Image (cartoon, rainbow, N blue to C red):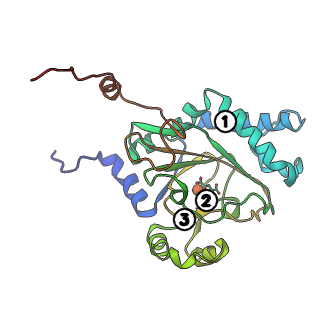
Amino acid sequence: MTRNSFHLPEDVSLSEEFLRNGYVILRTESEDELARMQNFVACYAATKLGLAEPHNAQSFLDNIADHISVDKLNDFRLDLIDVMNAQAWMRPLYLSLARSAINNIVGNELSMQRRINLSIQIPDDDSSLLPVHADVWSGDSPFEVVLWVPLVDCASTKSMYLMPPREDREIQAQLAAFNSKSSEDLFAAIEPFAKFLEVPFGHVLLFSQTLMHGNRVNIERKTRWSMNCRFKSVFSPYADKKLGEFFEPVTLRANTRFAMQYELPRNFDE
Ligand SMILES: O=C(O)CCC(=O)C(=O)O
Ligand SMILES: [Fe+2]
């Protein structure tokens, strides 16, 4: 068979979906590992709150508002983030949730954000919101993707919204018109196009953070729990978030490592 593409046929449809929508939602490649992560977070959260280990991690997380108030939420969340990131297994496990999709969409020689983030949005809480933004506006490189992983079923305002590429680019081209306006004005402009993504537990979302996105007050009945972490190809351009500070190479390949050891001979005229 002759082929005139360098890409594997099985990679093409996912690539095209990402190019069309700026995101893909997939089943995790590592269901057991995701369940382990959910359980770890639920058990640690229960311990922090002086409660017994939950029988059903997901339902415990969904209903966390029965056990914690908004004023305690941010410290509780930051504490959980520290504990998650202190586990040596956490970041390798996180990559394993979507490794082949990331290899396809980003590359197989990756830099990974050094810290995994955790969002918790309890119903009706207006104090933990991320207004409309693109991460590239604050020092991220357009070459990064975000791997966003929910620990509970996320949809509607319990999830995040993302702009479709065409409308996003049209509005970003006119962004100067919003200089003296509020982020609510910008949200009003994108609202007709922005899409709240449905990402059930067991699935992952990979998206380009160059597209405007954010979240709104969660008016569903259950709490949102989601993690996010950025990946990019090691040798693609960095913006303010640098290699070594914000990012760390995690999958350097043999010849790259070999080449990094090489020194040209000194004072040698060929
Ligand atoms: O989780 C959200 O609602 C927004 C996440 C976000 O802004 C990001 O991961 O870049
Ligand atoms: Fe963001």
For mark 3, does the 10 Å Cα neighbourhood hold few (<14), some (14 to 19), or many (20 or more) residues?
many
Q: Residue at x 47, y 73 (%)?
A: 167
| Whole-percent x, y for residue 87 in the image | 66, 28
Spatial CA span between label 3 and label 2: 17 Å
Task: State the mark number for residue 212.
Answer: 3
Q: Quadrant of residue 57?
A: top right
Q: Which residue is drawn at 45% across and 70% down?
A: 169
Q: Quadrant of residue 131?
A: bottom right
Determine whether the residue tagged by mark 1 lies in a helix, strand or loop: helix
Residue annotated with mark 1: 37
Q: Report whether 165 appears left or right of 28.
A: left
Q: Report whether 201 appears left or right of 134.
A: right
Q: Which of 213 and 24 is in front in this view?
A: 213
The amino acid on which the numbered mark 3 sits, given as a three-letter code, is Met
Q: Nearer the viewer, residue 65 or 255?
A: 255
Task: State the mark number for residue 23.
Answer: none
